[in-house]
Image (cartoon, grey):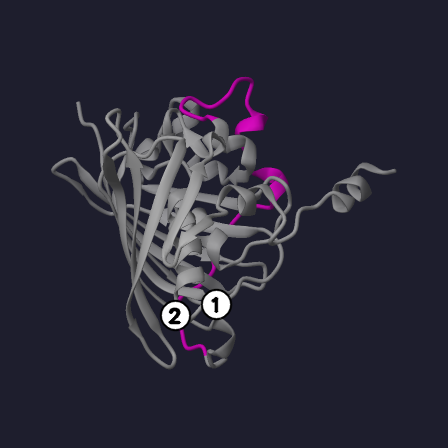
Amino acid sequence: MPEAASAAATRAVVGDSEFDRDTGLTLREPGVYDIDLSAGWTIINAVNGGYLLAVLGRALGDALPHRDPFTISAHYLTASQPGPAVVRTELVRGGRTLSTGQASLLQYDEEGREVERIRVLASYGDLDALPDDVRTTAVPPAFPPMDQCFGPQDGPAPVDGSSAIADRLMIKIDPATLGWALGAPSGKGEMRAWFGLADGRDADPLSLLLAVDALPPTAFEIGLSGWVPTVELTVHIRTRPAPGPLRVSITTRNLAGGFLEEDAEVWDSDDRLVAQSRQLARVRLG
């Protein structure tokens, strides 16, 4: 069988993929869920914040009257570790078109006490019920074709700081934002890449929560290195993405006092802006 046909035959689908299994939760009681956070979504030793947001997003989609995240804001309180965790959800307000809820992800310390890792406030609705009217000045980012972009597998050795999550993602970075990997960062706070899941699963609203936080930090292209932990992340899901690879564009305009912002846009294969986000992250200086 030709390689392309073989890949198509084994392509994962929404609901039956590694991402779905690793964000899957077990209902303990109404509003309370258990999960074993997978080590497959770690960066060095830290669990990726986008993966964690997708876990909380899935729990809220199950607990609230509506299923699709419209806006979700997360505060990252302590670093999550692979292993057992519990998600506690609460309905704040249920309306006809929007439901608002909150959720917390907790793990246990060495003495068995619960430690809160993340707290989220979110509004959910029905993306399929939104009107088709779009009035925007936003334009898709200009990208080279995918075969002219580069991922971790294209280098002679793994990119410094890459880890287990890189094996689960399809990321092809625009060469114009890849100077940091060659020891020559541009000084601009920009990162652009084609994005998808490595097993071929198409994007959905939950995986968009991962997409906004899966690229290398813009701090690398500014000339900084090391861990850039997220303090707060807000994501807006604008529409259900079309099948095919996504294009993710992230920019930073201001680094001050050891913190920077990252503004992300996610565009689908139909040139629609399907998600936007802003996060505040801490950087190590000096």
Residue at (52, 65) in percent of width and height:
240
**Secondary element at tag 1:** loop
| Left-right relation of 59 to 157 | left
Kind of residue at badge 1 = Thr
Residue most extreme to the right: 1
Residue at (37, 82) in percent of width and height:
96
Residue most extreme to the front: 29
Where residue 236 appears, as percent x and y from the top left, is: 36, 62
Q: What stretch is highlighted in magenta?
A: 134-163
Q: Which of 216 and 41 is in front in this view?
A: 41
Where residue 72 appears, as percent x and y from the top left, is: 33, 59
Is residue 269 within the magenta segment? no
Is residue 161 within the magenta segment? yes
User: Magenta span: helix, strand or loop, mainly?
Assistant: loop
- Above or below for 225 versus 38: above
Q: Classify 10 Å Cα crowding around label 2: few (below 14), some (14-19), many (20 and above).
A: few
Where residue 189 appears, as percent x and y from the top left, is: 31, 41
The CA distance from mark 2 to mark 1 is 17 Å
Give the residue at mark 1. Answer: 239
Judge whether residue 143 can be spotted in this image: yes
Instruction: Say which mark, if any, is on residue 137.
Output: 2
Kind of residue at badge 2 = Thr
Where residue 71 appears, as percent x and y from the top left, is: 34, 63
Quarter of the view holding residue 235: bottom left
- Above or below for 74 versus 49: below
Quarter of the view holding residue 3: top right
In the rendered view of the protein, which quadrant contains the N terminus?
Answer: top right
Residue at (47, 48) in percent of width and height:
26
Q: Nearer the viewer, residue 199 or 286?
A: 199
Tag 1 or tag 2, which sits nearer the N-term?
2
Judge whether residue 150 can be spotted in this image: no
